[in-house]
């Protein structure tokens, strides 16, 4: 058996002066970065990073200037337009600019807005996708967003709009009826309103809900609850954002697939949480 040859350095994309790369840093764990993200970190002159980027990730760019541009609900935050124009200004100065955003820049990350501003100002860009917390964060908690015995659809929604309020444009009855599993980003602040809207739309009070905070990091916590009790349970557990909320029966799969618990010597709680019987060997 021979080792595969390394990809020649010349084959990796080059971050040229005056360019901005908008890059996903993944949900937290530095090991979930893509190779293109690592390549970008090693070339950048300046890294503009979000609040959800783990500090250890920046260690891969010791040569770069690090500029914080985080936006967190209820805390002093940079204005989005100012961030976008700062990227334009840095590129026009001939800097190699890496805009590093938690998760995927195009999934509730304002990456599309920033990219649009850059293009409008004639700044060349490259988009580097990242693992979104709504998929990778739940996977670390042992929750698959799709499961053949549970759902053939999944809907990703945001828990607040541009003003910070619960999104008024979402058709909760349609979402409730049309999607077996709902994944909610940034929904902790308005969880009471969101849960009430889903209950009013006909979701059962007993429906499983999982809240994963600080997903994929050593600080990760998981709260398993139900739609009827999630608001009170969150308050009782005193958990804080950032969080991903999963509504639907796929949340039950954590009872079997909590791989981090198993690695720590904790046996699965339920080998058949869906009550469907063991799958056939040939399935």
Image: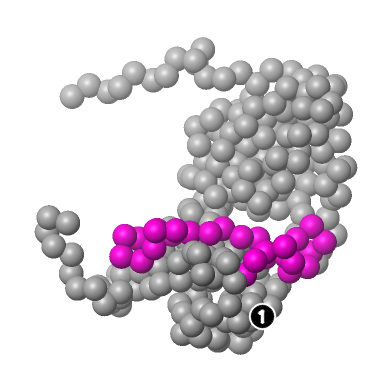
Q: Residue at x 81, y 22 (%)?
A: 122
Q: Position of residue 227 (x, y in %)?
A: 53, 81
Quarter-wise, where is residue 90 in the image? top right
Residue 222 located left or right of residue 195: left
The reply to whether the magenta stretch includes residue 264 is: no
The image position of residue 66, as x and y in percent, is 74, 38
Residue 96: give x, y in percent of width and height.
73, 24
Q: Is residue 238 visible?
A: no
Q: Which residue is mark 1?
A: 192
Q: Which residue is at the front of the view, 220 or 255? A: 255
Judge whether residue 1 can be spotted in this image: yes
Query: At 79% across and 57% down in the image, what residue appears?
Result: 162
| Residue depicted at x 58% and y 67% | 174
Which element type, helix, strand or loop, lies under badge 1? helix
Examine the rendered structure and indicate whether residue 208 appears above or below residue 47. below
Residue found 59% across the figure and 71% down from its top = 173
| x and y, in percent, of residue 252 in the image | 38, 73
Left or right: 159 with respect to 65? left
Above or below: residue 159 compared with residue 77? below
Residue 93: quarter of image: top right
Whether residue 169 is in magenta: the answer is yes
CA neighbours of label 1 inside 10 A, class few (<14), some (14 to 19), many (20+): some
- Dominant secondary structure, magenta: loop
Q: Quadrant of residue 265?
A: bottom left
Magenta region: 144-172
Quadrant in which the C terminus appears:
bottom left
Above or below, 93 relative to 186: above
Q: How is the image coloured?
A: one colour
Quarter of the figure that contains the N terminus: top left
281 on left or right of 276: left
Looking at the image, is 75 positioned above or below residue 63? below
């Amino acid at each position: 058996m021979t080792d595969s040859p390394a990809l020649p350095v010349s084959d990796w994309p080059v971050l040229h002066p005056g360019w901005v790369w908008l890059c996903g840093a993944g949900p937290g764990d530095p090991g979930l970065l893509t190779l293109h993200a690592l390549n970008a970190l090693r070339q950048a002159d300046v890294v503009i990073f979000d609040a959800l980027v783990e500090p250890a990730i920046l260690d891969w760019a010791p040569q770069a200037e690090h500029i914080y541009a985080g936006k967190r609900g209820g805390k002093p935050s940079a204005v989005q337009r100012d961030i976008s124009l700062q990227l334009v200004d840095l590129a026009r100065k001939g800097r190699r600019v890496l805009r590093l955003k938690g998760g995927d820049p195009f999934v509730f990350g304002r990456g599309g807005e920033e990219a649009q501003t850059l293009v409008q100002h004639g700044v060349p860009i490259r988009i580097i996708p990242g693992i979104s917390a709504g998929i990778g964060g739940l996977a670390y908690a042992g929750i698959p967003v799709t499961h053949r015995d549970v759902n053939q659809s999944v809907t990703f929604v945001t828990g607040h709009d541009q003003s910070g309020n619960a999104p008024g444009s979402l058709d909760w009855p349609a979402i409730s009826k049309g999607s077996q599993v709902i994944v909610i980003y940034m929904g902790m602040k308005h969880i009471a309103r969101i849960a009430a809207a889903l209950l009013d739309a006909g979701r059962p009070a007993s429906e499983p809900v999982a809240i994963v905070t600080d997903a994929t990091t050593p600080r990760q916590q998981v709260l398993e609850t139900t739609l009827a009790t999630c608001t009170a349970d969150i308050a009782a557990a005193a958990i804080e954002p950032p969080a991903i909320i999963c509504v639907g029966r796929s949340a039950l799969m954590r009872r079997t697939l909590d791989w981090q618990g198993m690695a720590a010597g904790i046996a699965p709680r339920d080998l058949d949480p869906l009550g469907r019987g063991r799958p056939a060997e040939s399935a």
